[in-house]
Amino acid sequence: MTTVNLGKQHAAAYQRLTDLSAEAATAMEKAGLSAGLTELIRIRVSQLNGCAFCLRMHTRDALAKGETPDRVAVLAAWWESQYFTDQERAALAVAERVNDIALTPRHPEDESALTDEQVSAVSWLAIVMGAWNRVAITSHYPVAP
C-alpha cells in the first residue's frame, strides 16, 4: 500500500479537523475542565490507539502546561493510582468508552463528578483525538529521536 500524507492530499479536510479540534478544546475550557486534563485525555486516547506521533506531541504539551511526569507515567493505568481526582477519573473513563464503543467499559467510573456539558466536551475531545490518531498513523508521520 502506498503511504499518502492525508493532510497534504486533502488540505481542506485536514483544516476542518484542525478547526474541530480547536472547538473541542474550547468546549473543554468552557465546561470548566483544565488544559492539563485536555492533554491527559489526548494522551490516553493516543495510548489506546497506538499513535506514537500524537503521544510524543501531547506528552510534551502536557509537561509544558505543568503536568507532572509521574501522572503522565501512570496514565496508562490511571484506575490503579491515586494520582487522579474523581473528576479526572470520570473524564478518562468517558474518553475510553467513547474511543472504544464496541467494548464494555474496562474501568467503569461514577460519572457524577462531571456535568452533562463536561461529559459532552470530553466525548468530543476523545472523538477528535481518535480522528487525529488515524490521520497520523495512516499517513505514517515520522517519530524519530
Image (spheres, rainbow, N blue to C red):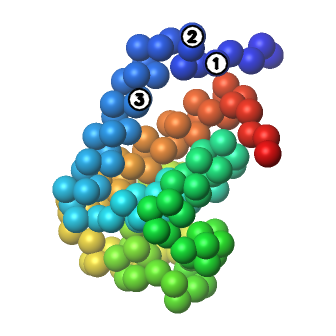
**114 in relation to 15, above or below:** below
Question: Dot 2 lies on which element?
Answer: helix
Look at the numbered discs 1 and 2 and tell me whether their residues touch, using CB distance below 8 Å.
yes
How much space separates mark 1 and mark 2, taking CA atoms?
6 Å
96 or 14: nearer the viewer: 14
Task: Indicate the position of residue 20 as horizontal and vertical percent values.
Answer: 34, 34
Which amino acid is tagged 1? Asn
135 lies left or right of 145:
left
Residue at numbered disc 3: 17
Q: Residue at x 58, y 19 (%)?
A: 6
102 lies left or right of 24:
right
Question: Dot 3 lies on which element?
Answer: helix
Labels 3 and 2: the sequence-earlier one: 2
**Looking at this rendering, what residue extends furthest in the top direction?**
9
87 lies left or right of 69:
left
Residue at numbered disc 1: 5
Q: Is residue 131 visible?
A: yes
Residue at numbered disc 2: 9
51 lies left or right of 37:
right
Quarter containing the C terminus: top right
Badge 2 local density, few (<14 within 10 Å), some, or many (20+)? few
